[in-house]
Amino acid sequence: MAKLVSKTYGDALFEVAVEQGTLDTMLEEVEAVLQVLRDNKEYISLLSHPRIPAEEKKVMVEKAFKGKVSSELTGFIITIVEKGRFSEIEDILLYFMSKVWDEKKIGVACVTSAAALSDTQKKEIEAKLLKTTSYVKFRMSYSVNPALIGGMVIQIGDRVVDSSVKTKLENMAKELNKIQLSN
């Protein structure tokens, strides 16, 4: 159900931005709003609370966002509040962002390596991903997990390329367990 809600509202915001030719601006504003919401989790709880009247919630949204983001985005957030869907605002905004990134052929890649990567290595990885995918740009995030032993895991959407030493050793162990030794 939550996926349907985020898609419905995210698609609506996307259509408004396309119609008005404000896709880039709206993306920047949505990213800023999302960051504010992530930094203030209590705000989501407050605007999702069933005992606070919708009118009061609307006033809080206007105080927080009016003049700081476009009137379209402020109105959109107020609509979400009125419909009682503010608890799902993060999913809605994330869906909108992914839809814009798809439209602009921007991929999102999460790279996990056993050790920290140098700037040169990061650039090489991004260049390789650009060459092997249909994306024209990537939003890259990097993390370190020493348990990988070596190599890396790259995730783009629902696709995962795992070239870690840990996985290779696990696969090798599975194959060795399949072999039956005979006297």
Image: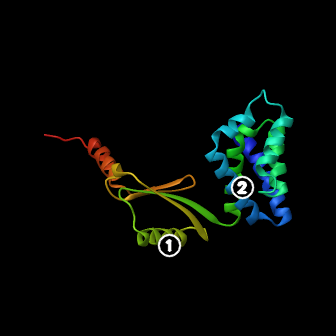
The answer to which of 34 and 132 lies nearer the viewer is 34
The answer to which of 180 and 91 lies nearer the viewer is 91
Instruction: Please report the residue visible at 26 percent of the width from the left and 44 percent of the height from the top.
Output: 179
The amino acid at mark 2 is: Val
The amino acid at mark 1 is: Ala
- Quadrant (top left/top right/bottom left/bottom right) for the N terminus: top right
Secondary structure beneath disc 1?
A: helix
Q: Earlier in the sequence, mark 2 or mark 1?
A: 2
Instruction: Please report the residue visible at 84 percent of the width from the left and 38 percent of the height from the top.
Output: 82
The label nearer to you, 2 versus 1, is 2
Q: Find disc 2 in the rendering and name its residue.
A: 30
In this rendering, the count of numbered labels is 2
Instruction: Please report the residue visible at 81 percent of the width from the left and 51 percent of the height from the top.
Output: 74
Secondary structure beneath disc 2?
A: helix
The answer to which of 46 and 10 lies nearer the viewer is 46
Q: Position of residue 169 (x, y in %)?
A: 30, 50
Whether residue 134 is visible here, answered yes or no, is no
